[in-house]
Structures are given as structure tokens and as C-alpha cells.
Image (cartoon, rainbow, N blue to C red):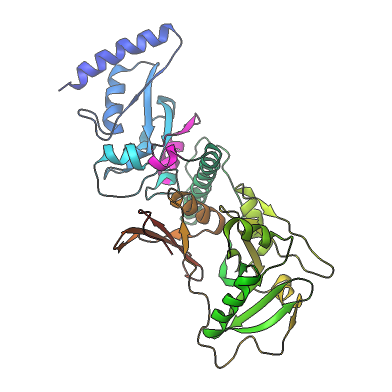
Amino acid sequence: MIDDDLAAAQLRQLAERAALRQLKVGYEALSWGTNVRTFDHAWRIVQKVDHPHLGLIVDSFHTLAPPDDCSAPRNLPGERIFFVQLADAPRLGMNALTLSRHFRCFPGQGDLDVPNFLGAVLETGYTGTISLEIFNDDLRGAPPRQSAHDAMRSLLFTEEQMRRAMQSKEAAASSDGKSPRARRRVDLFDPPSPPKLEGIAFVEFAIDQQTEAQLTAMLQQVGFRRVGVHRNKKVVLFAQGDIRIVLNREPDSFAQSYQLLHGPSVCALAIKTDDAMAAVGRAESYGVTRFHGRIGPNEHSIPAVRSLDGSLIYFTDATGENTSAFDTDFDMLGESISSDKDHLERVDHIAQALPEGRLDAWVLFYRTLLGLEPEAVVDLPDPYGLVHSKAMSNRERTVRFPLNISESRNTAAL
């Protein structure tokens, strides 16, 4: 065991040597450390040294992964914090060292309250460097470009959450007649608010001629009716209750290119929102690419963005111009879209089967794009493996995406 006085003496020597070289030394507590496991303990040692070239490194993982209170950083002097590291992680009930080495993830992908931690740090007056420190088995094998996009999106999401929390505190202080605490401010990311989601407007399948007959027969067997044919394209509309299914085999189209790459599959879905253009604006502010498709004569454009797998997410207004625009591109076949014979009323959820290592990226994508929040993780036993499922949904549960990933090559996550 090394006592605090001995540690302080050794750190003082190190700080003096750093001063000769115009360097600074940051002292960090590790949550699995033998002697110093919390940043407040590390701060007591730094105070003993009392040297301008020795300060603290604070890390969200080491603060939040153990069951400690993260409010204490607010009491630190910001000028004595030399470096800030951010990482999220799931709550898996394992020791901190194993969790740190294999399961750290970007802020917004795990269960730790990283925005509250960073807000506490900024309230000290800290305006220095913020770093992501991620150790993750999936991340090590991921393409660098994908990781860079996820990293940037996570930092923006953390800033947005932190800004909203600060604004709520300031509003509460003003309503109580108290003056908000003065502090050094930094500019924080302020995108359009998450859209209000009313439900799924339609689901679009990219198909070929052979699968069109098979999928048509399957839809009709479960009660869907062929209610419309596109005026200019090889696109058919099926309906039951409020559910709309689009079958698209238009040549030289986005759907065809998607079908050639992925086979017959869902290539797009449309989400009803309170403001479609604001939803697209939010997506673009988070680095999501807007999609501009080919528009024929007298056709209507529906705002859309590309999701992580290259498929499209359209946004329609729950009430507004582009709500009915979709229908006007079809010649209706005389059947009512809704019928007393309908057994299905609406889309409850859309499950997504993900490749290994992509779950965290999709969690962050849906949190930032749509404001969805993760539900509790469910592990589904299978005779040949295990299916790991995490659903993303809004508070009203009008939109819900269970994200399924198989941990065995012998099990298909559907």
C-alpha cells in the first residue's frame, strides 16, 4: 500500500521535472485501482502536491461505471482539470476492468449519464480538451470512416443533451426567483428538436418480377388489398387498416439498385411526423445524408435521408401537404384503403436484423435522428445460439424498432 503522502511526494518530483520542460502532468484515478479509485481521492493528493504543473484527468467511465455520485466534479476548480475523457458503457454487472477493456462505447450508445457528467465538468469553468477514450471489441474491427461518423455523432448528441439539461435548470431557477449560477460558457450544439412521431406511413419493398407474385400472394393471404398502381412507375400499393405496403420494381431506380445489392427486401420506410422538413434538418445537422430521388412529371417529392445500411427513411407530415401527395401519385383501384373486414390496424413495430458489431451504431443513429430511447435488453435463447435484442422507441410507442443481432452464425436474427 502506498499512502497519500508518499504518492504526493512522488508526484511533486514528477511535476517539477515537467515544469522544467514546460509540460503538465495529469493524475487520473482508475476505477479498479489498488489505492486510488475515485477522482475525489485523486484530487486530495493533487491538493497535497499543490503544484501548477500537476492537475487532474477526469474520465466519465471511471466516475460513472462504479456506483458513485458524479455531482462532485462541480466542486472542482476548472483550472486544475487538465484533461477530460468521455466514454459510455452498458450496465452488465461485471468488474470495472473487464467492462472497460471490452465494452466501452461512444456516448449515447450505453447506459451511463455522460451528458450530466460533462455538464458537471463544464460548471467548474473547464474549457479545455475533451477526448473520447473507447475500448471495444467491435470498434477495433470496424471501418475507420464508420467509427469517425459515430464518434462525431456521439459528441454532438452529448452536447445537445447537455444544453437541454442546462436550459431546464436555468428555467427552473428563474421560476423560483433565483439567479442562474454564473459560469464560463462554451457554445453547445443546438439542432432542431427531435420530431414528434405519429407512426409508420408506409413500408416499401424492393422486389423483382419473380418475388412480386410471391409477395403479392402472401400479402393477400393476410388480408391486404391491392388498392393503387403508380401512374408512371412499376409500383403497387397495398393497404389494410392504416398499414400501407409499397412493392417497387421500377427499373433504373433506387429500389432496383438496392434489390440488386441486398436481394428482395425493405428498401425504405416512411415516418409520419409533425414537421417533415424539420426532421430532415435535424438529420442533416447530425451528418445524415439527404436523399434526392428521380422525380417524374407531375410527381411529388417526399423528403428522405439515408440510414446506416443505405436504405431510406422518408418523412411525411401527419397533417399537411405531403401527407396526401403520396396518394395522388397512384391511380386508385376503387377499393377503400380502410375496410370493416380489416384485421390489422397499424404497424406496431419494425424489427431489424443487424450484422455483428453494428448494434451500438444503430442505437446512436435512432437516438440522434428520431429521439428514440433504448428499452431493456432482451436475450432470446435459440437451439443454435443467442439472439441479443434491444428495442428503440419513443415515449408514446408510436414508432418502435427492435434491433436484433445473433451471436451465432447458425442462428438468423429476424
* Residue depicted at 76% across the width and 71% down the height: 233
Q: Position of residue 23 (x, y in %)?
A: 44, 13
Q: Hey, which residue is sitting farthest top in the picture?
A: 20
Say left or right for 386 vs 33: right
Position of residue 223 relative to residue 326, above or below, is: below
**Along the line of sight, which residue is nearer the eye, 206 or 364?**
206
Q: Position of residue 400 (x, y in %)?
A: 48, 67
Asked which quadrant contains residue 333, the reply is bottom right
Q: Quadrant of the N terminus?
A: top left
Q: Hey, which residue is sitting farthest bottom in the picture?
A: 340
Residue range in magenta is: 116-141
From this viewpoint, is residue 71 visible?
A: no
**Along the line of sight, which residue is nearer the eye, 377 or 253?**
253
Q: Hey, which residue is sitting farthest front in the picture?
A: 210
From this viewpoint, is residue 291 visible?
A: yes
**Along the line of sight, which residue is nearer the eye, 196 or 337?**
337
Q: Position of residue 334 (x, y in %)?
A: 71, 90
* Residue depicted at 35% across the width and 13% down the height: 15
Position of residue 35 relative to residue 209, above or below, is: above
**Along the line of sight, which residue is nearer the eye, 38 or 308?**
308
* Residue depicted at 30% across the width and 17% down the height: 49
- Magenta stretch: includes residue 117: yes
Q: Quadrant of the C terminus?
A: bottom left
Q: Hey, which residue is sitting farthest right in the picture?
A: 297
